Image: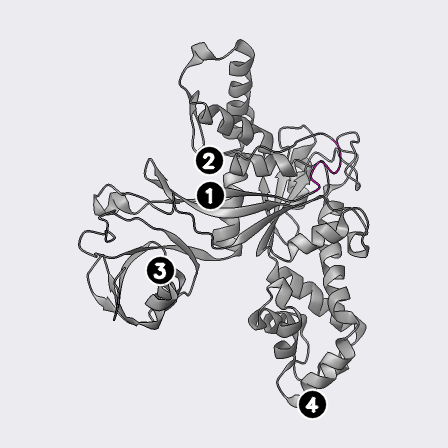
């Protein structure tokens, strides 16, 4: 399978919350998982999938995916995940593995924050009695650490940057985009953060310290969107904490990474029928399982899937891409009549692109030469021509016509 990644998703959180278990459940990577802090020292990278209904049943064809998978009419689009070392208080000052943690965060387009919803790990990631620790403090910790890290990047030179922006009339966003290039923060994010903070964009030198910190906090929210995964939902103390977490200004997905990993491993061995994100599973060969294994699977079915609707792992990944990053799927083909590429493969590729992407922008995503020589595109559903500035919709199937090549 040819792979194409549209965004890098960071898996973050304090030590010992199930962060690496979530990563393994999403990617089936084999890494160290242990019940003590800092099991993850170097970041682990792997491939997870965004799950979306495939378009091939609508067209009544059998597809031949190249850059993705199609299982039972479900298209699984590969995305890259990174499991980042655990964060502890003072990470922005270099405490623990703070420098490494924050250096990896700069590469991520969005973050999944794994929380121990049971309250069974303290602020350092050490085991404590379930219910003893408040998981809301973990949310506040991560937000503070990332905000303070971004503050340190800009604070020292802020007076000079602000004065220069006012004097040369290029605008503060122009100067900050250059300075924050390593964090992947674009001008539109900076302008939106200034607007949300209610500040005068033309007079940054007049901002107070409180204004500056408010701007940075908004910039953190916009440029590094964050999803909370309330993990360990099977523990008795978790449910009350999940309800409290849902009252925060963020999206919360209840989950059991341990349950998802068990299901993925069983499916990998052919013991059960299960796809990531399914609401149920079927045991295929009960004779190959011990009584304890069957009991464990039935417990997952009753306590996790029936109660929660899913394990939450796949739901979390989909929520990041379709809600936080606001992306859609597009299927480019060469032949709009047969929905195929030049090798005859039907609906070979699926791309995740930001909502608002145009036909020509998709051409550039496929290949720069295709974008440079773009003439028009053809909508495979009604065979009408669409122009370069046509904004595409989710599940669009298009053929791009260029002066040199059609795809």
The image position of residue 171, as x and y in percent, is 63, 83
Q: Nearer the viewer, mark 4 or mark 2?
A: 4
Point 41% across, 15% down: residue: 285
- Viewer-nearest residue: 228 or 388: 388
Answer with mark 1 or mark 4, whichever residue precedes in sequence: 1
Q: Secondary structure at mark 3?
A: loop
Point 40% across, 65% down: residue: 357
Q: Residues within 10 Å of mark 2 (few under 14, many from 20)?
A: many
Quadrant of the image for the C terminus? bottom left
Per the image, the residue denoted by label 4 is 167
Does the CB distance between marks 1 and 4 fall below 8 Å?
Answer: no
Per the image, the residue denoted by label 3 is 393
The image position of residue 58, as x and y in percent, is 25, 46
Colouring rule applied to residues: one colour
> Label 4 to label 3, Cα distance in Å?
42 Å
> Label 1 to label 4, Cα distance in Å?
48 Å
- From this view, report whether residue 170 is shown above or below residue 382: below
Q: Secondary structure at mark 2?
A: loop
> Label 4 to label 2, Cα distance in Å?
54 Å
Does the CB distance between marks 2 and 1 fall below 8 Å?
Answer: yes
Characterize the magenta stretch by its predominant secondary structure: loop
> Label 2 to label 3, Cα distance in Å?
25 Å
> Label 1 to label 3, Cα distance in Å?
21 Å
The image position of residue 15, as x and y in percent, is 73, 39
Per the image, the residue denoted by label 1 is 49
Magenta stretch, residue numbers: 36-41
Answer with mark 2 or mark 3, whichever residue precedes in sequence: 2
**Viewed as shown, does residue 17 lie left or right of 391?**
right
Q: Secondary structure at mark 4?
A: helix
- Tag of residue 276: 2
Q: Nearer the viewer, mark 1 or mark 3?
A: 1
Does the CB distance between marks 4 and 3 fall below 8 Å?
Answer: no
């Amino acid at each position: 399978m040819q792979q194409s990644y549209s965004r890098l998703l960071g898996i973050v959180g304090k030590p010992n919350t199930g962060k690496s278990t979530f990563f393994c459940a999403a990617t089936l990577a084999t890494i160290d998982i242990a019940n003590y802090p800092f099991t993850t020292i170097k970041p682990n990278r792997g491939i997870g999938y965004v799950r979306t209904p495939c378009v091939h049943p609508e067209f009544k064809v059998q597809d031949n995916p190249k850059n993705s998978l199609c299982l039972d009419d479900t298209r699984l689009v590969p995305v890259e995940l990174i499991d980042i070392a655990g964060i502890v208080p003072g990470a922005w000052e270099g405490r623990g593995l703070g420098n490494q943690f924050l250096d990896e965060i700069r590469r991520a387009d969005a973050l999944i924050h794994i929380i121990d919803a049971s309250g069974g790990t303290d602020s350092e990631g050490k085991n404590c009695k379930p219910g003893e620790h408040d998981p809301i403090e973990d949310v506040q910790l991560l937000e503070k650490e990332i905000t303070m890290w971004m503050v340190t990047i800009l604070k020292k030179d802020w007076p000079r940057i602000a004065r220069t922006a006012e004097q040369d009339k290029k605008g503060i966003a122009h100067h900050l985009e250059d300075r924050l290039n390593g964090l992947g923060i674009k001008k539109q994010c900076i302008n939106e953060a200034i607007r949300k903070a209610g500040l005068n964009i033309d007079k940054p030198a007049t901002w107070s310290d409180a204004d500056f910190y408010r701007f940075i906090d908004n910039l953190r929210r916009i440029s590094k969107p964050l999803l909370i995964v309330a993990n360990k939902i099977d523990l008795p103390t978790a449910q009350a904490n999940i309800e409290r977490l849902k009252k925060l200004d963020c999206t919360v997905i209840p989950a059991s990474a341990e349950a998802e990993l068990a299901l993925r491993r069983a499916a990998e061995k052919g013991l059960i029928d299960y796809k990531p994100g399914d609401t149920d599973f079927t045991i295929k060969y009960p004779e190959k399982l011990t009584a304890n294994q069957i009991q464990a699977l039935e417990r997952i079915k009753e306590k996790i899937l029936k109660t929660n609707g899913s394990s939450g792992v796949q739901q979390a990944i989909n929520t990041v891409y379709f809600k936080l990053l606001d992306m859609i799927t597009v299927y480019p083909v060469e032949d709009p009549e047969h929905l195929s590429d030049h090798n005859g493969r039907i609906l070979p590729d699926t791309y995740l692109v930001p909502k608002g992407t145009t036909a020509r922008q998709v051409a550039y995503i496929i290949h720069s030469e295709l974008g440079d020589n773009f003439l028009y595109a053809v909508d495979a559903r009604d065979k009408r021509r669409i122009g370069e500035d046509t904004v595409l919709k989710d599940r669009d199937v298009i053929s791009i016509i260029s002066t040199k090549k059609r795809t």
